[in-house]
Every structure is written in structure tokens, then in C-alpha cells.
Amino acid sequence: MTRSDFISKDLPPLTADTGSGSAPSAVRFKLTLRAKGILALIALALFATLVGLLAAQERGRLFITVQELEKIHALEEKLAAVNTSVAHAVLRLQEAYYSPDPQPTYDGIALDIEAIQAGLDGLKPEYAKFAASAARFERDLASMRTTPARGALLDLRMSLHDLVGELDQFTREVRDRKDALSGKYRRIYDAITVIIVTGGLVGVVLFGGVVTLFFTRLAWDIKKLETRALEVVTGYRGPPLEVTRHDEIGNLMESVNRMQSALREHERHQEISRQQHFHQEKMAAIGSLAAGVAHEINNPIAAIHGIAQRISGIRQSHQCPTNDPLCEPELILEQTKRISQITRQLSEIAAPRSAEPQLLDLNAVVRTTCNFIGYDRRFRSVNLVQNLDPQLPAVNIVADHFTQVLMNLLINAADATEGITGRKPTVTVTTAARDGWLHLAVADNGCGMDRETLGQAFDEAYTTKPAGKGTGLGLFICKSLVEQSGGRIELESTPGEGTRALVALPLLSTSVA
């Protein structure tokens, strides 16, 4: 298998940004409490306007009905006047007909006849049936005027009797129309009353219920907001408060959530700073101790080294007093070199380093860290493999931060291989450069993690290690330091097969620590 195949298999490109930032949420339309109050007043005004329009429509119908009733009353007055005139005329005709005067005259009934004619002329537009009766009456009246006789008088009386019958029929029709209009008037009046009363009740119930619900929910949300604010002040750092409103109270909820997030972020930075300070103090103490140990060891080592060189010289000159096979100064020289190498590595790993990002050879940092951590007792039975890309370009990082990240990943990998059976515990460190990113992978063949554990691995204070063996801050600090450098970190794991930590650092942009 070629190296490119190995890198392609071992280091898939990181496609998702695992940073803490979230995608911006969709912009929501927000209404202030003042705007909601104005909208409520507008809705109330519209409802009242609707009720008023319905009532006005019914009032219009009522007005039309009243006008029709007035017309009916006026028509009834006309009918009453005509009926009166006809009654008087009938009585006069009766008297004239039975009068002993053999030649009755028109003068005695002239006034009543004129009143009847005026009344009929007024009723013709309302009742077209009067046309035939009126024409007959006029014809008989003209005959009466020209030839006064009992026969003409009888014909005129018969015309009046027919006219009385039609007037009675018309009067009943008018009365029926009046009763219908009166019923219609009452129905419209009742409808107006129902509209006003129902509209008032619906308005009171509907808007009263909405206002009650609004202020009840407002009180609940304010109480919930007050409770969460107190919880945040007293140390609550759980899930944020759900924002269920889009007004000033919703803005306060978002502000409390931002305050909680800011406090949590501030505490995280404080914890990271504390851990970094602790790490720096620890490394400084190790450096000081390493310098003292190296100084104390180097003196006797130098003396032993000199003696071994002298023995080796004597042996090479064949001046060794005895040919003892135990006389092997090369073993002494090899072990003194090993001790010197250990003290040098200890000094290198503990040497003070700059807190600012620098262009560094990542492979060199990896080798130094792996060589140093290889002396840890957890790695005595672990096969630590370094598969480093010799063409790896320099990367702009803080060496001390990256050393801390790599040490945490290596220690977690070693802990994961503890207790496995059936295979040799192995931790593999791989580096490669691809697509403008520098990739680092720390893989183990340990116990692995399930999906739930994998989802919480980077959470602060989350750990699956026994009490006293882990604090749950290792991966959390790794993620924070990598993201501060502009990179990202992911975990891939299969239960029972192992875990791989993938770190990507930018090559083309300047990292910020």
C-alpha cells in the first residue's frame, strides 16, 4: 500500500465545522407590546365597525320599511276619505231615488261626487283596477247630468255599489300590506337588537378572553424569565431558555440566553486559562527539575563515560590485563548515551516556549512529544507508531498549546487501549497536508465509543473514566485550543474497534491562538 493510499484511508477530509457557532436563524418578524396593543385596538375598532355596519344595514331596511308604512298610512287616509265620500253619496242617492220628486237633480250630490272623483284620481296610481270602475262611474255621472231621471240615478247608484266593493277589496289588500310591513318592521327591529346585543357580548367575551390570555401568558413568561435569570446568577449553565415570544419580553429572554452563553464562555475561557497556567507552571517545574537532574546526572555520567573510553582504549591496544569477556566498555558507552538522550529530551519538552503563534515543524513537535510521553507507564505495553509526512510544510501554531493537545489525545488513546485482549495495543500518529489544510490523526485500537458518548465527548466536565482518573476537561480544552488556532477537531469511533481523533489546521491563513 502506498503512502497516499494510507493517508487517504486514514485521514478523510473534515467536511463539517465543529465549532461552537451555529448557523444564523431565520429572521423573525417581531411585534412590540405597544404594537400589539395598537393592533388589538384596531381589531376592536374593526369589530365594532363590522357590528355597526350590520346594524346600519338593518337600520336602512328599517327606514325603508318605515317609509313604506308611511305610504300605507297615507293611502289608508285617502281610502278613508273616498269611502266616506262614497258612503255620503250613496245615502244622498238613496234619498234622491226615493224622493217624491219625479225629476231628481244633480245638485244635491255634487259635493260628494266631486270628493269621490278627487279621491279616485289620487288612488289610480296605487290601484290600476279602479280605471274601469272610475270610467263607468264617470259615464253614469255624465248621463245623470244630461238627463236627470230615476233610471240614470239607479245606474249611478249601481256604479257606486261596484266601486264600494272594489274599495273594500283594496282596503283589505292595503291592510294586509300594512300587517306584513309591521311584521317586517318588528323583525328588522329585533334583528338590530340581536346584532347589537350579540356583537357586544361577543366583543366582551372574545376580546376579554384574548386580553386575559395575553396578560396571563405575559405573567407566566415574566415569571419564567425571572426564575431563569436568578438561576443563571446562581450558576445555571444548562440549555438556554426557549424564546416563545417576539416582543420586548422575547428580547429579554434572548438577552438572558446571551448572558448565560457569555458567562459560560467566560467561565470556559477562565478554565482554559487556568489549565494553561497550570500546564505552564507544571512544565516550568519539570524544566527546572530536569535542568537540576541533568546537571547532577551529567557529572557522574561524564566520569563514567571517560572511564569507559579509557577502558576501550586499553582494550583496543591489547593491554587489558585479562581477556575477560565481561570487559565490554561499549555497553557502558551505549547506556551513558541513552541517559544523555533522555535528559536532553526532557530538557527540550520542558523548555519555555513562546505564547505567540510561530511557524513550526509539526513533525518535530510530534516526535518530541511522542518521545517524551513514551516514558509514561501507560505506554509501556503500547506500540506507539509515528507515520509522519516528510514533506509536511510549516504551520503557524503555539507550540505549547499543540503539545498540550497532542499529549491529551495520546493519553486518551493509551487509556482506551487499557485492558483490551486479542490484539496488541497500538496508537498511531499520522500527519499529512492536503487541500490547504494540515491533517493530524491520533488513532487507537481500543474500546471505542458508542454514539451517545461520542456526541458528548467534547462537552465540558464529561468523562467516562473512573473517578479520580479523569476530569472531563481534556477533549474540551483540545477543542478550544484547536479552534483558537483556526482549526477544527472531530472524533470517529467504533465500539470495540477503536477511536480516531482528527485535527485540521489551516496552512494558507494565519492562525490565531
Image (cartoon, rainbow, N blue to C red):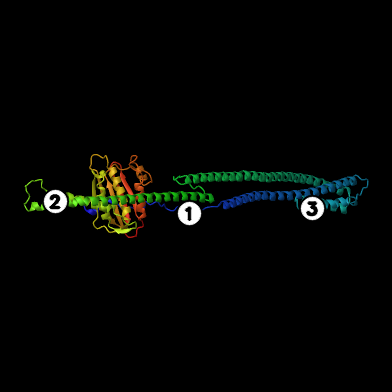
Quadrant showing the C terminus? bottom left
SS of the residue under disc 3: helix
Q: Residues within 10 Å of mark 2 (few under 14, many from 20)?
A: many
Question: In percent of the image, x 25 and y 50: which residue is there?
Answer: 293
Gap between marks 3 and 1 measured at Cα: 76 Å
Q: Does residue 85 appear in this view?
A: yes
**Which residue is labeled 2 in the image?**
308
SS of the residue under disc 2: helix
At label 2, the amino acid type is Ala
N-terminal of the pair, mark 3 or mark 2, is 3
Q: Give the side of residue 467 with respect to residue 216, left or right.
A: left
Q: Give the side of residue 313 with respect to residue 85, left or right.
A: left
Mark drawn on residue 122: 3
N-terminal of the pair, mark 1 or mark 2, is 1
> How many circles with numbers are drawn on the protein?
3
N-terminal of the pair, mark 3 or mark 1, is 1
Task: Where is residue 300? Give x, y as percent.
Answer: 19, 50
Q: Which mark is in front, 1 or 2?
A: 2
Q: Give the side of residue 360 with respect to residue 264, left or right.
A: left
In-front residue for pair 135/428: 428
In-front residue for pair 342/404: 342
Q: Residues within 10 Å of mark 3 (few under 14, many from 20)?
A: some
At label 3, the amino acid type is Gly
Task: Where is residue 439? Give x, y as percent.
Answer: 29, 54
Gap between marks 1 and 2 measured at Cα: 79 Å
Q: Does residue 140 appear in this view?
A: no
Mark drawn on residue 27: 1
Task: Where is residue 172? Give x, y as percent.
Answer: 76, 44
In-front residue for pair 225/474: 474
